[in-house]
Image: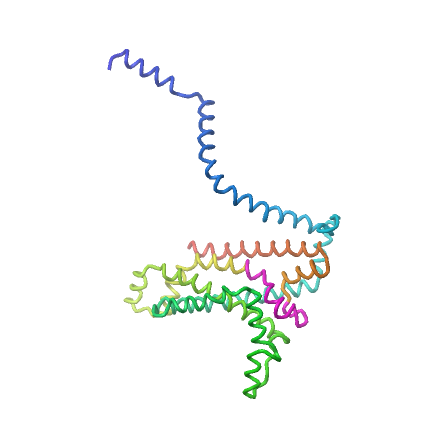
C-alpha cells in the first residue's frame, strides 16, 4: 500500500472515530434500545405489582398509624395502634396458636412428604396413581375441605363419632376440646398440602444422579444411610425454598379456623389472620387490624431471612 493510500485510510479512520461525548450518547442509545423490549415484557407485571401489591402495602403501613381510613377520614394516632397490639391478650394467644400450628404442620407434612416421596422414588409401579391420589386434596377448595372435615369430626353427626358410637366406643370431641381442635386443623391442612410436597420432593429425588446411588449401593450403604448421606444433602436447596414457602403460607391460616371452630374453644384455635379478620370486619377496629397485619408481615420477613441465613449457608457448604 502506497503512502497516499495509508494516509487516506488514516483520515477515514479518524473521521469514523467518536469523541468522548459522542461515544457516551451512542452508548446510552444502545442501552435504551436493549431496555425497550425488556420493559415491554416486564411492564405489565410491574404495573400489576405496583397497583395490587406495592400501593396497598404502603397504604396498609400508613393506616397502621391511624384510626379509620376505609369509610371515614383517617386520623393519625402515632404508635397507639402498635402499643394496643403488643398489649392485646387475644392477639398474644393467637400468635402462640399460630406458632404452634406452624411448627407442628411443617414438621408433620415435611416428614410424611419426604417418606412417601422416597417410597415412590424407589418403587415405580403404580406411581402415577399415587401421585394423582395424593395431589387431589389440593384441588379441593379450602371451604369445601373444611366442610369435609366438619362432617368427619363433628361430635354429634360426624362420621368418625358415628362409627365409634356404633362400635360401643366413647365419642371424641375433636372440635370442642383443646388441644384436639388445633390438632384437627393441623390434620386438615396436612391432608390438603401433603400431595404438593410429595411431588415437590419426589422431583428433587429424581434429579439426583443415579451414579451416586449406585456407588453407595456397591459400597454397602442401606436405604436409610443413602437417604441421609446423599438424598438429604442434595435436597438442601429445595428444603430452603420449601421452608420459606411453608412459613409464608402457614402463617396465613384462616379458612379452616373459620369453617371448623371460629377460633374456639376458648380462643384455642385463633390464628393471627383470623384475629385481623375479626378486628376489621366484626369490631371495625381498622387501626389495630392494619397494625397487626403489618406486624405479621414483619414476623414472616424476619423468619424468612432467618431460615435463609441458616439453611442457605448450610446448603452452600
Give x and y (percent) for residue 222: 34, 70
Which quadrant would the N terminus be assigned to in this image?
top left
Give x and y (percent) for residue 167: 54, 87
From this viewpoint, which residue is outermost toward the top? 4
Colour mode? rainbow
Residue 59 relative to residue 13: left or right: right
Q: Is residue 122 above or below residue 238?
A: below
Residue 101 relative to residue 25: left or right: right
The residue under the point 56% across, 72% down is 149
Give x and y (percent) for residue 275: 66, 62
Q: Is residue 34 above or below residue 218?
A: above
The residue under the point 45% across, 22% down is 22
Residue 119 versus residue 225: which sits nearer the camera? 119
The residue under the point 58% across, 75% down is 151
Q: Is residue 288 above or below residue 1?
A: below
Which quadrant would the C terminus be assigned to in this image?
bottom left
Residue 254 versus residue 106: which sits nearer the camera? 254
User: On the image, which quarter does residue 258 sit in?
Assistant: bottom right
Q: Is residue 244 magenta?
A: no
Query: What is the span of residues highlighted in magenta in the rendered image?
Result: 248-269
Give x and y (percent) for residue 138: 50, 64
Q: Is residue 268 magenta?
A: yes
Residue 122 relative to residue 114: left or right: left
The residue under the point 30% across, 67% down is 217
Amino acid at each position: 500500500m502506497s503512502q497516499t493510500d495509508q494516509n487516506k485510510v488514516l483520515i477515514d479512520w479518524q473521521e469514523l472515530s467518536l469523541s468522548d461525548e459522542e461515544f457516551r450518547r451512542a452508548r446510552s442509545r444502545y442501552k435504551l434500545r436493549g431496555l425497550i423490549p425488556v420493559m415491554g415484557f416486564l411492564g405489565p407485571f410491574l404495573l400489576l405489582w405496583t397497583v395490587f401489591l406495592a400501593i396497598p402495602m404502603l397504604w396498609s403501613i400508613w393506616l397502621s398509624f391511624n384510626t379509620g381510613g376505609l369509610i371515614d377520614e383517617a386520623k393519625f394516632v402515632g404508635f397507639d395502634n402498635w402499643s394496643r397490639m403488643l398489649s392485646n391478650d387475644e392477639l398474644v394467644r393467637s400468635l402462640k396458636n399460630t406458632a404452634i400450628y406452624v411448627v407442628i404442620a411443617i414438621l408433620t407434612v415435611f416428614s410424611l412428604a419426604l417418606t412417601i416421596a422416597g417410597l415412590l422414588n424407589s418403587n415405580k409401579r403404580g406411581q402415577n396413581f399415587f401421585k394423582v391420589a395424593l395431589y387431589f386434596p389440593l384441588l379441593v377448595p379450602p371451604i369445601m375441605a373444611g366442610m369435609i372435615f366438619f362432617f368427619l369430626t363433628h361430635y354429634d353427626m360426624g362420621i368418625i363419632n358415628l362409627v365409634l358410637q356404633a362400635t360401643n366406643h366413647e365419642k371424641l370431641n375433636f372440635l370442642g376440646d383443646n388441644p384436639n381442635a388445633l390438632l384437627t386443623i393441623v390434620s386438615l391442612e396436612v391432608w390438603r398440602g401433603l400431595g404438593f410436597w410429595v411431588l415437590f420432593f419426589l422431583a428433587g429425588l429424581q434429579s439426583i444422579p443415579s451414579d451416586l446411588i449406585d456407588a453407595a449401593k456397591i459400597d454397602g450403604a442401606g436405604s436409610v444411610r443413602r437417604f441421609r448421606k446423599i438424598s438429604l444433602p442434595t435436597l438442601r436447596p429445595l428444603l430452603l425454598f420449601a421452608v420459606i414457602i411453608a412459613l409464608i403460607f402457614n402463617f396465613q391460616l384462616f379458612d379452616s379456623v373459620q369453617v371448623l371452630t371460629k377460633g374456639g374453644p376458648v380462643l384455642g384455635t385463633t390464628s393471627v389472620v383470623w384475629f385481623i379478620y375479626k378486628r376489621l370486619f366484626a369490631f371495625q377496629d381498622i387501626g389495630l387490624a392494619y397494625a397487626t397485619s403489618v406486624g405479621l408481615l414483619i414476623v414472616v420477613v424476619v423468619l424468612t431471612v432467618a431460615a435463609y441465613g441458616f439453611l442457605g449457608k448450610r446448603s452452600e457448604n
